[in-house]
Image: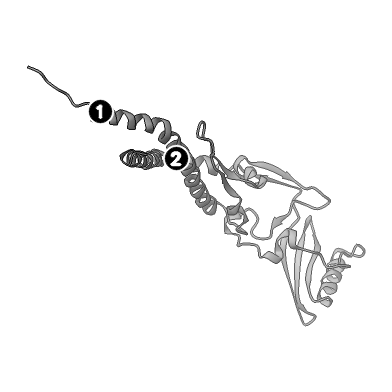
Amino acid sequence: MRIEVDTRGIETLVRELADVRKRSLPYAMRSYVNDAAFSTRKAYGDKVKQELKLRSPWTLRSIQVDKASSLREPVAAMGSTTSYMATQEEGAIERKKGSEGVPLPAAAPGARRTRGRTAAKNQLGSIKLVQGARVRTGSVQRRNAAAIAIAARKGGGVVFLNLGNRRKGLFRITGTKRGVRVKKVWDLSKGRVTIPKNPMMESTLERIRDTYPRLAFKALDYQLKRAFARSRQGG
């Protein structure tokens, strides 16, 4: 009894698998690494929005992905380009850099998540103090009154006020002599501020780690389908 086996199909499969190993797996791995990085960026951004009261879109824009380009050893990097986000993650003690205290957005001290966003005109880098409003003689009350009056005469603006008892800050003056409004925009009372550790990245990775295998399977499945389709076409 003679049994004949047609190995042409097996030979084709072997060639296809060899092609997959040589051409498809590296692309699948690189695609998976990049997909995982972008998925992590989105999850991290959601965590940041949950934990912090963002005052501008810049914080979320700073969370970027450096895509993997190599096929041999694909490596992607994800994180914020700002130093203050590293401070949030690791914690720090921030000390004043000049004669005044550490600038803190004016709101309930310590209640970071309840503070509203700082308007563009009140962001620290955008503020220009009213010229001539920094009065240095007389009592605290007279110096403050003079600074407010000067700002009001000039159409309003931001002035430095020392309220005594180590309470001081930047205040925006609006209105006229008939009705002047004074609103604190930055507090400069504290010479040192402790920023507690808030490992948002670590908790993000812990939460989404189970989604990575699905991304890997998706990338591999896509490349396998491409490889087999290419093989069927004689490519």
Instruction: Determine the secondary structure under disc 1.
Output: helix
Q: Residues within 10 Å of mark 1 (few under 14, many from 20)?
A: few
Q: Amino acid at mark 2?
A: Tyr
Pointer 2: what residue? 32
Query: Residue 10, which numbered label?
Result: 1
Q: Is residue 9 above or below residue 129?
A: above
Q: Amino acid at mark 1?
A: Ile
Q: Position of residue 88 (x, y in %)?
A: 62, 45
Q: Are marks 2 and 1 in contact (CB under 8 Å)?
A: no
Quadrant hosting residue 155 = bottom right
Instruction: Determine the secondary structure under disc 2.
Output: helix
Q: Is residue 158 above or below residue 168?
A: below
In depth, the one of 51 and 222 nearer the eye is: 222
Q: Residue furthest bottom?
A: 178
- Is 88 displayed left or right of 175 in the figure? left
Q: Residue furthest right?
A: 137
Q: Residues within 10 Å of mark 2 (few under 14, many from 20)?
A: many
